[in-house]
Image: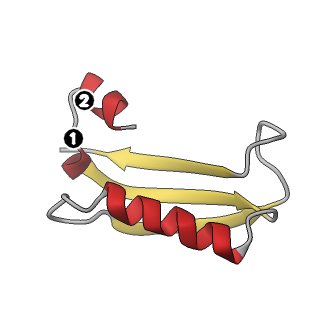
Amino acid sequence: MQNFLEYSGFTLDDIIRTDWAFTNDVDSAQFGQIATVWEEFLSDVEVKPARGTLRYVQRLGMPDMMVEYEMIIAR
C-alpha cells in the first residue's frame, strides 16, 4: 500500500479516511490482528485518518477474499 501511495505522489499522511468490509468469516481474533497491523502501519502518521465505516458482508468480489478496504486520500 505504501508503494502505491508513493508511486501516486502521496504519503501515509494524506490518508483522510478508510472504510472496511469484512466477511462474516472474520472472527474476533482476526479482527484484533487486523486492527493491530493497521495501527502499526499508521504509527508514524501525525494526524490519524478519521474512522470510517465497518461493514460485515456475506462475501466480497473474490470468493477467497475476507477483507476489503477503501481509502480516501487528499492533500
**In-image side of 18 versus 13 (left or right):** right
| Residue under the point 80% across and 41% down | 64
Split into 4 quadrants, where in the image is the C terminus?
top left
Task: Name the outermost residue toward the left.
Answer: 46
| Amino acid on which disc 1 is placed | Thr
Q: Position of residue 66 (x, y in %)?
A: 73, 51
Residue type at tag 2: Glu
- Horizontal and vertical percent for residue 4? 36, 29
Quadrant occupied by the N terminus: top left
Mark 1 element type: loop
Q: Position of residue 28 (x, y in %)?
A: 68, 76
For image coordinates 81% across by 65% down, the residue present is 24
**In the displayed structure image, the side of residue 72 where residue 13 appears, left or right:** left
What's the mark number on residue 6? 2
User: Tag 2, which secondary structure?
Assistant: helix
* Badge 1 vs badge 2, beta-carbon distance below 8 Å: yes
Residue drawn at 25 percent across, 29 percent down: 6
Instruction: Please give the residue where the numbered disc 1 appears in the rendered image.
Output: 11
Instruction: Classify 10 Å Cα crowding around label 1: few (below 14), some (14-19), many (20 and above).
Output: some
Front residue of 10/32: it is: 32
Q: Position of residue 48 (x, y in %)?
A: 26, 65
Which one is in front, 48 or 29? 29
Image-based side of 10 in relation to 52, left or right: left
Q: Earlier in the sequence, mark 1 or mark 2?
A: 2
